[in-house]
Amino acid sequence: MKFSAFASRNTKEILRDPLTLFFGIGFPLVLLFLLSAIQANIPVDLFEISNLVPGIAVFGLSFISLFSGTLIAKDRTTSFLMRLFASPHTASDFILGYALPLLPMAVAQSAICFTVSFFLGLPVNLNVLLALVVLIPAAVLFIGLGLLAGSIFNDKQVGGICGALLTNLSAWLSGTWFDLNLIGGAFKTIAYLLPFVHAVESTRAALNGNYSDIFPHLIWVIAYAAAILAIAVIVFGQKMKNQKA
Amino acid sequence: MIAIQTTELTKKYGTKTAVNSLNLSINEGELFALLGVNGAGKTTTIKMLSCLAAPTGGDAVLLGNSIISNPLAVKETINVSPQETAVAPNLTVKENIELIAKMYGSTKSTAQTKSAEMITAFSLTEVAKAKSKTLSGGMQRRLSIAMALISNPKILFLDEPTLGLDVLARRELWAEIKKLKGKITIILTTHYMEEAEALSDRIGIMSNGELKAVGTAAELIERTGAKIFEDAFVALATESEVEI
């Protein structure tokens, strides 16, 4: 496989950055502990562990966009990508090289999140494995968003867009921090037109054994993931074809 | 034998013409310098020849392969050391070189062997296990050229290889480039007069996207009646196209 050497490099670049560990694993876990502590003192349905952990897992995945976007943007701004583009590889080789290492990282990140949740009261059963599978389209969505942002913006802009804007927007619009019904109106309508709340709802459905509720939400995530990934591939391919002087 | 032949090679960005109808012939084993001020069209020329930017007109044939109809075959025979630092920052020197070797088809063991040879040849042994982001600018440029050579290219593009380096680092890099002369075809872009004069077999002077003159440094000096090469460059950069 022509992209495997490049994929291996991308894995090393991401895992050797200490910020990856902090934002990718540490920060979501801190939130998980914090919100569980709130739940212990002031019980709220939303923060019950089986409702909370899907939201935290999706929130954690939003950092995957930051990792992939920053890596691509840095490669572009340092001309490393120019060197790679001069090699006999196609656009799909590069896209696979960037995207594939991130998928196992995303699954591992979610798995850590669920494992820690076992200690906070999440029942250990096969539904957790199903929830991990249901999260894969969301992981692809966030990888695609990172690819797209990294292909368009520089690393500082990616930091702002993916690190601040996307993580916050995806959290607010996912129904993790607050019940969207409390706000209702246009906010709720917009939230349900976007994929983030559907990613959380489908994972909640899987985790709670409500299997018939999974697919109506998951189809939104799959559609968005396919569309975003397709756009990212087109934009990346265009950038590869025409490196401006 | 001709390594590179361009025919009316042109690149436009909107209304701006970055390279205009470039006709150029470079022989195998030649070190050819493209000399010009910033914005002259040197880097755009390199990007077109290395299939990184599609021409808007004309064509170029590298070792028998067209950059338009057969870019993947062209890419098999070339490599590029870009203008800016182009190394993977969190990978070691050794890992950077091996990465490029593997991307050009080397097996793991071959990549390791070739990388060890390249590390010795470019005096990078002491920093072989250091992350490339910790290297000095001069060392990073040396690594960048080693990465470009690991694929055994027949044509090597060096885009402003000594830009921003101090005098000592520049001279060290010149020595490395001189060792390659005659072994592979090298196209070097620079806006340092002395660099073009010291390293190249022939020099092409570009200005406003056009090739103004081609010849050896001595020929270009003689052509203009100048005393030094810098004066010859200034005179030729403002003249219409001349083949010496």
Image: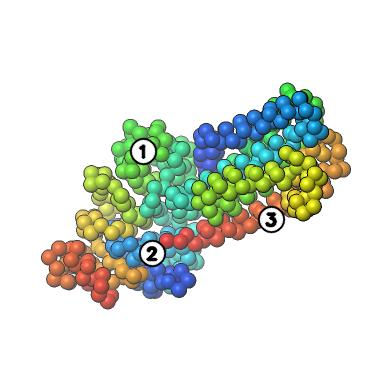
* Residue drawn at 60 percent across, 59 percent down: A234
Q: First in sequence: mark 1 or mark 2?
A: 2
Three-letter code, disc 3: Ala
Identify the residue position indicated by label 3 in the image. A227
Could you say where residue B151 lies in the image, as x and y percent from the top left? 41, 48
Could you say where residue B223 lies in the image, as x and y percent from the top left? 17, 71
Total label count? Answer: 3
Residue A179 is marked as none
Instruction: Looking at this view, name the residue that lies furthest to the top.
Output: A119
Could you say where residue B42 lies in the image, as x and y percent from the top left? 35, 63
Identify the residue position indicated by label 2 in the image. B45
Label 3 is found on which chain of the structure?
Answer: A
Q: Is residue A207 left or right of residue A154?
A: right
Label 2: state its secondary structure: helix
Please tell me which residue lies in front, B158 or B38: B38
Q: Residue A83, relative to residue B49: is it above or below? A: above
Q: Nearer the viewer, mark 1 or mark 2?
A: 1
* Residue drawn at 35 percent across, 55 percent down: B159
Q: Answer whether labels 2 and 3 touch (C-beta < 8 Å).
A: no
* Residue drawn at 63 percent across, 57 percent down: A231
Three-letter code, disc 1: Leu
Mark pair 2, 3: CA separation: 35 Å
Could you say where residue B231 lies in the image, as x and y percent from the top left? 18, 66
Instruction: Looking at this view, name the residue that lies furthest to the bottom.
Output: B240
Three-letter code, disc 2: Thr
Q: Quadrant of the C terminus of chain A?
A: bottom left
Say few, some or many: other residues with alpha carbon within 10 Å of mark 1 (under 14 / 14 to 19 / 20 or more). some
Mark pair 3, 1: CA separation: 41 Å
Mark pair 1, 2: CA separation: 29 Å
Please tell me which residue lies in front, B86 or B244: B86
* Residue drawn at 41 percent across, 55 percent down: B78
Identify the residue position indicated by label 1 in the image. B135
